[in-house]
Image (cartoon, rainbow, N blue to C red):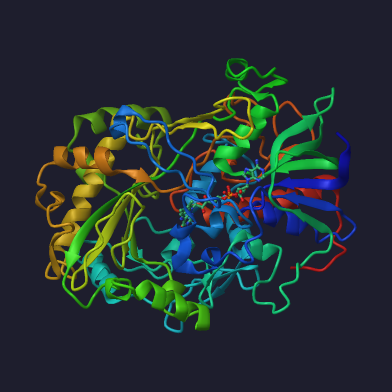
């Protein structure tokens, strides 16, 4: 098998973080960079650009088609774990929400007494969040300009609310969550509600691909001549020499042809939280017992690879609403085709925007302190760490609420209201869960998806916090002054949650309904060498080898209390800067 190329840096994965690393390194025009992506270029893939087309990418050739392994805590339900397989990766299939999380989340990453990852504090992360972004505020939006960028490749906006979202905000305020302008970018408000930034501009979704090609440039040319883009090639392993130095990668094409690409400096894995650990394991880097299990000779025993899998859960509580508030009428009947035509012609209409509406953060201390389970755990955790049992300080929220502006949900919800009826959801998202899962190889065949066991809700405290959050969420919707008179009942009408009065009813509800928020993280955790579970150090270098880094959501030592795409961009930005420092690469080329 002959080598088919040699590059200074090889970036594996053209998703969210990968293109950032490639593009920033390419600012030095003397460098020769290869970016390898298993999926296609997204230029001709309409559903990666049409904001409302996101779920049409699921379950086909543009999805990795991963599934969770059943677990009794979620009633052995098998859940789809969609990930984008094209340029832009999961940023090209996501809900476009740019909820950065709290400043404290990143100060925890950096703090020696918590995750001990120097250089990952909030000030640094806000610098990189802003660097990746060009924010276009609405005229009457009160912008916190310290928390937005003006010249990054990812163009963002706020969303014009449908009437239902304004009514939901009224209920949030009525129930004690005040409106705080731009709180989801500023990262300082723990209890409040407001609008969040979206990775949408001029009716199009922004993806990691923007770093490589300016979508609004008529010519559609690539920004950098020194980045070779290789699509439809799956990286199957990192090649290590006898000194355990990464010297290249092996790839497989869809017609099963193997190729080898060599690198002079470094390989950077940006394959996401399921596939980065998978590729390390296929390369002989991981827990030795897991490798022996599938017949792979361990080269480096790194016990943390694939462990520490964290995810946010969401549960959708649907309500039927009076007519005139939601946007269901724009989708019912054959209106989807009309809406798509409108988007095609003018990049406007309902498919030019995401269907999420109002947002809120809150803590649940008052409710939780009624429970012995919580109080016992609180006493212990306060003594041990000064934090609550979820690992949070008082300036970090337990929960996010966000709502839809019509009946919209993951695919297993299949009860859209007929014409003449409207529905919306209050989505309850559990932050900082205690449950952790894992990613393991199913076999040594790189074509097989890995085994993913999330273990969601396996920790009783997660169930308690989540059930209380759902109960409060229902009170806000049913008693809050904006929504109490417009909600007609649950949707579908036979849904029982509308009548729930007891916490146990909500516990059953979350076990039966909670589903992934598509935020997997932590499977190649960053941490100091003293942490046996860490896979990369604070400069993102893989333990036990040289010339190999990871830059994607898998490196998060703990998920942000927010949504992860903005973090993925920031990780890519910071990784590129660290590589430049380490290799003393000078900027000679054009800036983005
Ligand atoms: C349906 C959905 C909705 C979401 N909604 C939001 C939201 O609204 N807001 C938010 O902040 N976050 C959201 N997220 C999460 C967010 O999009 C991801 O956390 C983030 O994009 C992950 O970035 P990443 O770089 O880690 O991985 P990815 O973006 O998944 O990139 C990995 C890339 O590597 C490629 N790849 C994988 N394996 C190989 C291989 N072996 N060889 C070559 N290439 C390979 C993949 O095809 C992909 O392009 C959502 C995610 C999904 C799926």
Task: Using the image as rendered, state which of residue 489 and residue 589 is in the foreground.
Answer: 489
Instruction: Tell me if residue 276 comes above or below residue 16 in the rendering.
Output: above
* Image position of 471 (left or right of 388): left
Q: Residue at x 38, y 38 (%)?
A: 433
Instruction: Tell me if residue 519 comes above or below residue 144 in the rendering.
Output: above
* Image position of 185 (left or right of 89): left
Residue 107, percent from left and from top: 53, 46
Q: Quadrant of residue 330?
A: bottom left
Q: Quadrant of the N terminus?
A: top right
Residue 475, percent from left and from top: 16, 56
Q: Residue at x 45, y 48 (%)?
A: 518
Task: Using the image as rendered, state which of residue 146 and residue 309 is in the foreground.
Answer: 309
Q: Quadrant of residue 277?
A: top right
Residue 210, percent from left and from top: 65, 65
Residue 197, percent from left and from top: 47, 67
Q: Residue at x 63, y 58 (%)?
A: 128
Note whether residue 474 is visible: yes
Q: Quadrant of residue 287?
A: top right
């Amino acid at each position: 098998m002959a080598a088919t190329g040699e590059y200074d840096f090889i970036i594996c994965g053209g998703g969210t973080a990968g293109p950032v690393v490639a593009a920033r390194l390419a600012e030095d025009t003397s460098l020769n960079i290869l970016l390898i992506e298993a999926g296609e270029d997204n230029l001709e893939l309409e559903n990666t650009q049409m904001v409302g087309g996101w779920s049409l990418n699921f379950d086909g050739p543009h999805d990795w088609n991963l599934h969770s392994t059943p677990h009794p805590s979620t009633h052995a339900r098998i859940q789809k774990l969609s990930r984008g397989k094209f340029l832009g990766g999961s940023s090209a299939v996501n809900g476009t929400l740019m909820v950065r999380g709290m400043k404290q989340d990143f100060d925890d990453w950096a703090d020696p007494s918590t995750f001990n990852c120097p250089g990952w504090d909030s000030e640094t992360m806000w610098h990189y969040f802003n660097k990746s972004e060009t924010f276009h505020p609405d005229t009457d939006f009160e912008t916190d300009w310290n928390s937005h960028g003006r010249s990054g490749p990812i163009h963002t906006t706020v969303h014009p609310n449908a009437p239902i979202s304004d009514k939901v905000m009224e209920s949030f305020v009525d129930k004690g969550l005040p409106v705080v302008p731009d709180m989801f970018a500023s990262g300082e408000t723990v209890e409040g509600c407001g609008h969040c930034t979206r990775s949408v501009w001029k009716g199009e979704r922004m993806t990691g691909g923007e770093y490589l090609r300016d979508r609004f440039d008529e010519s559609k040319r690539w920004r950098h001549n020194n980045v070779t883009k290789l699509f439809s090639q799956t990286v199957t392993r990192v090649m290590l020499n006898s000194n355990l130095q990464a010297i290249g990668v092996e790839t497989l094409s869809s017609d099963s042809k193997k190729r080898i690409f060599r690198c002079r400096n470094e390989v950077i894995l940006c394959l996401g939280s399921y596939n980065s650990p998978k590729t390390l394991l296929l390369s002989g880097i991981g827990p030795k017992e897991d490798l022996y299990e599938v017949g792979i000779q361990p080269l480096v025993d790194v016990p943390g690879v694939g462990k520490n899998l964290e995810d946010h859960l969401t549960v959708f509580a649907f309500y039927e609403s009076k007519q005139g508030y939601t946007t269901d009428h724009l989708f019912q009947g054959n209106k989807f085709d009309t809406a798509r035509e409108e988007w095609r012609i003018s990049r406007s209409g309902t498919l030019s925007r995401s269907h999420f509406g109002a947002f809120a953060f809150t803590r649940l201390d008052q409710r939780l302190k009624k429970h012995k389970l919580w109080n016992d755990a609180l006493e212990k955790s306060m003594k041990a760490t000064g934090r609550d049992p979820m690992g949070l300080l008082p300036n970090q929220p337990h929960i996010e609420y966000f709502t839809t502006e019509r009946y919209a949900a993951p695919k297993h919800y299949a009860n859209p209201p007929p014409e003449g009826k409207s529905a919306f959801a209050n989505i309850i998202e559990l932050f900082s869960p205690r449950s952790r899962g894992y990613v393991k190889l199913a076999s040594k065949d790189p074509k097989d998806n890995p085994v993913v066991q999330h273990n969601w809700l396996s920790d009783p405290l997660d169930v308690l916090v989540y059930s209380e959050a759902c109960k409060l969420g229902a009170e806000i919707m049913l008693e809050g002054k904006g929504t109490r008179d417009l909600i007609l009942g649950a949707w579908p009408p036979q849904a029982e949650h509308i009548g729930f009065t007891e916490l146990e009813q909500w516990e059953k509800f979350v076990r039966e309904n909670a589903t992934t928020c598509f935020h997997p993280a932590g499977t190649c955790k960053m941490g100091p060498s003293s942490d046996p579970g860490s896979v990369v150090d604070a400069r993102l270098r893989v333990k036990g080898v040289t010339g190999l880094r990871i830059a994607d959501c898998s490196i998060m030592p703990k998920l942000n209390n927010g949504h992860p795409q903005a973090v993925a961009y920031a990780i890519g930005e910071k990784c590129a800067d660290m590589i430049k420092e380490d290799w003393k690469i000078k900027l000679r080329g054009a800036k983005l």
